[in-house]
Amino acid sequence: MNKERFLAGAIAVYAAPAGESTAATIAVMPDDIPVKKAPIDLDQFLKLAGVVASGGEAKDMSGEGCVTVNDEPESRRRRKLAIGDVVNVEGAGAFCVAEAE
């Protein structure tokens, strides 16, 4: 089954060829956020990604269940993130911890 792939910004859409299901699958491609040193605390990473302005905002956001790390709900703002971890923030998008060059 050969599917065509279309990229529009950070969203990838896979459309079924003619004659197959018309349902499309949408997958969010995470933005790479380079970090100088890993592991990095979740609250520091959220600030680096520009999602929050302070640690207090990060605490509120993670406490409300708005954050997942590698598809698992995360409520600890001091959670240590490693290179390759994917952080999803409700309403802000997906971010991948990347190694700085």
Image: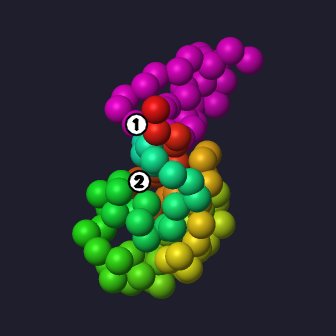
Q: Residue at x 68, y 15 (%)?
A: 2
Q: Residue at x 30, y 68 (%)?
A: 52
Count the numbered circles shown.
2
Task: Name the mark on residue 10.
Answer: 1
Q: Residue furthest right?
A: 1
The image quadrant that residue 24 belongs to is top right
- The amino acid type of the residue labelled 2 equals Gly
Q: Between marks 1 and 2, how big is the CA–CA gap?
A: 9 Å
Q: Which callout, 1 or 2, points at the residue further toward the start of the chain?
A: 1
Is 41 placed above or below 75 here? Answer: above
Is 5 placed above or below 43 here? Answer: above
Tell me if 40 is positioned left or right of 43 in this view. right
Task: Name the mark on residue 19.
Answer: none
Q: From this viewpoint, is residue 35 visible?
A: yes
Check whether the beta carbons of the residues at disc 1 and disc 2 lie within 8 A of each other. Answer: yes
SS at mark 1 in the image: loop
Is 13 placed above or below 94 here? Answer: above
The percent position of residue 67, horizontal first and vertical second, equals 50, 69
Location of the N terminus by quadrant is: top right
Q: Is residue 3 on the magenta stretch?
A: yes
Q: Is residue 53 on the magenta stretch?
A: no
Q: Which residues are magenta?
A: 1-30
- The amino acid type of the residue labelled 1 equals Ala
Q: Residue furthest front?
A: 37
SS at mark 2 in the image: strand
Residue position marked by numbered label 2 in the rendering: 93
The percent position of residue 64, horizontal first and vertical second, equals 45, 83
